[in-house]
Each structure stands twice: as C-alpha cells, then as structure tokens.
C-alpha cells in the first residue's frame, strides 16, 4: 500500500475514534406514577395548583406528573427510581414540594454531562378538566427542566370511564424525557 493510502487509512481510523469519543448518544427515559384522590389536600400537578374539590394522597405533595417526569429522567440516566432517591418513609419528604425531585434529577443529568432535550407528559384523569391548567403546567415544567416551552408537551386524557381512573379513584401520569449532550453553547 502506498504511503499516502496508509496515511489516509490511519487518519480515517483516528478521526472516527475521535468522533465516537466526543459524540454522546441521546438517552431516553419513561416514567409512570399514580395517586389516589382524597379530600382535604390541594391538587398539585406539574408544579401547579389545580382547582378541584380533592387532592392526591401521598407522602409528598403527591404531584404525580412531576413524579413521572423525575422517574423518566432517572430512567434515562439509568439511576434507579424516585423511591430510591427520596424514600417515602423519610419524614424529610413529608408534604415535600415535588419540584425538588425534578430539580434533583436535572442536576444529576448535568453531572453526567447531559441536559433535557424535550419532555412529553400525559395525565390521565376523569376530573378535573385540565384545559386551563395545561399552559401553566407547560411553563412550570419547562422552567424546572431548563428548556423552552416548545420542548414540553402536556397532554390530558380521560380513561373513557373505565376502571379505577374512570371511577375517579385517582389519576395517573406518564412521561417520556429525552436527554441530550450538554454543550458549552447549548
Ligand atoms: Mg408518586
């Protein structure tokens, strides 16, 4: 093989190794949570107080939407689940503001050289209707995640009156979060 070809071949191998060293693959995570409705508690969803005659039972403020988002981030990082990071037997987290859990997960992502790319959230409940709260949740979640509002989707569904959600016993939330490489300019 002529020298110039060997040189080109060596350059190709070296440059592809460099590219694979510097490019971090995006990571995706899925989160799910559910909580039972109870009287006498405020209904917190997505870090927003939602007007309703019932709130959600739970050790913290029971914000199922933020718990699902926290688990999605932890899942993308391969770092366990929310219960491992914030045990519900710990009195420290009694009535805790769930924004703290999301911010903790975002901080963990930063420590791993990642940041949130986008978040897709679905809340499943028969009531209350979330039409008015959705834009507020979107803004609240975008601020927590450090992304523009265009990178956050908040979707609301009913369960068509089927099962425990359909009977209004509680609600569920599902979230998918994409983490991307954290760059100097990004
Ligand atoms: Mg929860």
Image (tube, rainbow, N blue to C red):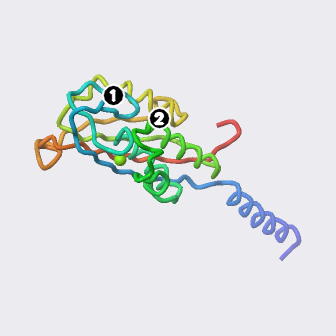
Q: Please name the residue shown 24% across and 32% down the image.
A: 40
Q: Residue at x 15, y 40 (%)?
A: 168
x then y, percent, for residue 53: 20, 28
Q: Is residue 86 left or right of residue 38?
A: right
* Left or right: 127 as drawn, with respect to 12: left
Residue at mark 1: 134
Image quarter (top left, top right, bottom left or bottom right) of the C terminus: top right
Tag 2's secondary structure? helix
Q: Would you identify the image quadrant in which residue 67 lies? A: top left
From the top left corner, tell me how far across and down residue 105 is, in percent.
53, 46
Could you tell whether 171 is left or right of 167 in the image? right
- Label drawn at residue 151: 2
Question: Which quadrant holds the N terminus?
Answer: bottom right
Q: Is residue 89 left or right of residue 4?
A: left
Q: What element does badge 1 sit on?
A: helix
4 vs 108: above or below? below
93 or 23, nearer to the observer? 93
In this rendering, the answer to whether 154 lies above or below 106 is above
Q: Quadrant of residue 134?
A: top left
């Amino acid at each position: 093989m002529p020298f110039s070809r060997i040189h080109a071949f060596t350059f190709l191998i070296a440059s592809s190794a460099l590219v694979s060293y510097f490019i971090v693959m995006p990571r995706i995570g899925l989160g799910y949570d559910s909580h039972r409705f109870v009287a006498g508690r405020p209904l917190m969803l997505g870090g927003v107080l939602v007007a309703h005659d019932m709130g959600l039972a739970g050790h913290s403020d029971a914000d199922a939407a933020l718990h699902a988002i926290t688990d999605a981030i932890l899942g993308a990082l391969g770092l366990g689940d929310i219960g491992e990071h914030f045990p519900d037997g710990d009195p420290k987290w009694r009535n805790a503001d769930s924004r703290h859990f999301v911010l903790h997960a975002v901080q963990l992502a930063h420590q791993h050289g990642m940041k949130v790319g986008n978040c897709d959230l679905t809340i499943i409940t028969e009531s209350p209707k979330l039409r008015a709260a959705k834009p507020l949740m979107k803004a609240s979640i975008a601020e927590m995640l450090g992304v523009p509002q265009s990178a956050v989707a908040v979707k609301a569904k009913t369960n068509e009156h089927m099962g425990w959600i359909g009977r209004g016993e509680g609600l569920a939330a599902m979230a998918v979060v994409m983490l991307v490489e954290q760059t100097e300019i990004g």
